[in-house]
Image (cartoon, rainbow, N blue to C red):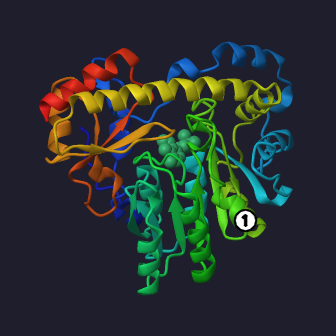
Amino acid sequence: MAVSQAWRFAERTRAGAGDGIAAILGLLGNTDLISFAGGFPDPRTFPADRVAALIGEMDASAFQYAPTQGLAGTRDAIAGRLERRPDDAELLVTSGGIEGLELVSKSFLDRGDVVVTEAPTYLGAIMAFRAFEADVVAVPLDADGLDVDALAALLDGGLRPKLLYTIPDHQNPAGVTLAADRRAGLVELARRYGFLLVEDVAYRELGFDGTAPPSLWSLAPDVVVQLGTTSKTFFPGVRLGWAVGPAEVVAQLVSAKQNTDQCAGALGQRLFEEYVRRGWIDEQLAASRALYGRKCELLLDALAASMPAGVEWTTPRGGFFSWVTVPVDAAELAQRAVAEGVAVVPGALFYPDGRGTNELRLSFSMVDETLIAPGIATLASVL
Ligand SMILES: Cc1ncc(COP(=O)(O)O)c(C=O)c1O
């Protein structure tokens, strides 16, 4: 007979990191739903034929262990896509954006350290920081991104973060972009108060018009570590990304990676390198920007057509998300919407502190174009 065990899990597992992402991934399996829930790329962007052909051409390096910092060719391909070519010691290949967050957290955070994020922010980041027992403080954002004046006031009042995590371009979940003048103000604050800026550029290359303001890393390579991912631009089935920042910081991340996964998978690294060298990534990006731009327009049109007075939403210029404010409890709305066949994510998941109860995230990246208007009409009727 099975005896139930009282497993003695580590104390840090009680920090309330939660299982929010698993819940969102779980919804994906339900094909009956019109889902505005997961931040998944549209499978129509996946380069199956090209990848199949490339695998046939691969030499042994693609199947072997790789150096912890990444294969030289892959690093060269990534470096060539950044605004400025970093020194060798400034760049690390990661197993995706989430691993970048894990490595930064592991390298910097002791119990009780303060991490500032945007309010709302990426759930995976809250989970990563909490897993290392950090105190996550979320500062509001508006249509121009993080409210840098509000941050300055908190710093002036004595807040002393070790890290500030931001998603400046087409933010997850709010769909907003940090204005250029705020970027200058933010790096100034990082220098003045001595914290590291962790810049997550997951959606940076997915501006609908192909443009983006200067990255924080390009403005201040002395105080910024930029975390990138190929998940939204290539495909997430290879877990691949990068960290670029001050050489001493990158050296510490390399050290942390040695006992995380030792190296990012060589097969994914070689595939991405070849995909870049042949110019295919730029072709895929152009098609993805057009596809997501079209879907976003359909979503905004549907919201304008269906939503009652008192509902507000952000107008993304790229990325996957719009953020909606509703005059009712969003968790209850989400529950009722699922019963009617529509999935959305209630906003409180994206705050570390219980805010966001009348907000929700709509993702337009994966939903079928023909289902956007009916899905939003159903959501409006439930509302
Ligand atoms: C802001 C942000 N950062 C990182 C990630 C995760 O990236 P990856 O798939 O490379 O781990 C996501 C994915 O949803 C994201 O939205």
Residue 285, image x and y in percent? 64, 29
Examine the image and state in which quarter residue 184 appears. bottom right
- Quadrant in which the N terminus appears: top left
Q: Count of labels shown?
A: 1
Residue located at (44% from left, 51% from top): 122
Q: Is residue 255 visible?
A: no
Examine the image and state in which quarter residue 223 appears. bottom right
- Quadrant in which the C terminus appears: top left
Residue 381, image x and y in percent? 13, 28
Residue located at (82% from left, 22% from top): 58
* 298 lies left or right of 128: left
Circle 1 packing at 10 Å, graded few (<14), some (14-19), many (20+), is some
Residue 74, image x and y in percent? 80, 39
Q: Secondary structure at mark 1?
A: loop
- Disc 1 marks a residue whose amino acid type is Pro
Q: Is residue 265 visible?
A: yes
Residue 123, image x and y in percent? 40, 51
Against 287, residue 311 (above or below) is below
Residue located at (57% from left, 45% from top): 202
* 270 lies left or right of 372: right
- Residue at the disc numbered 1: 221
Residue located at (42% from left, 58% from top): 126
Against 285, residue 220 (above or below) is below
Residue placed most toward the observer, 359 or 109: 359
Against 204, residue 267 (above or below) is above
Residue placed most toward the observer, 28 or 196: 196
* 319 lies left or right of 65: left
Residue placed most toward the observer, 212 or 2: 212
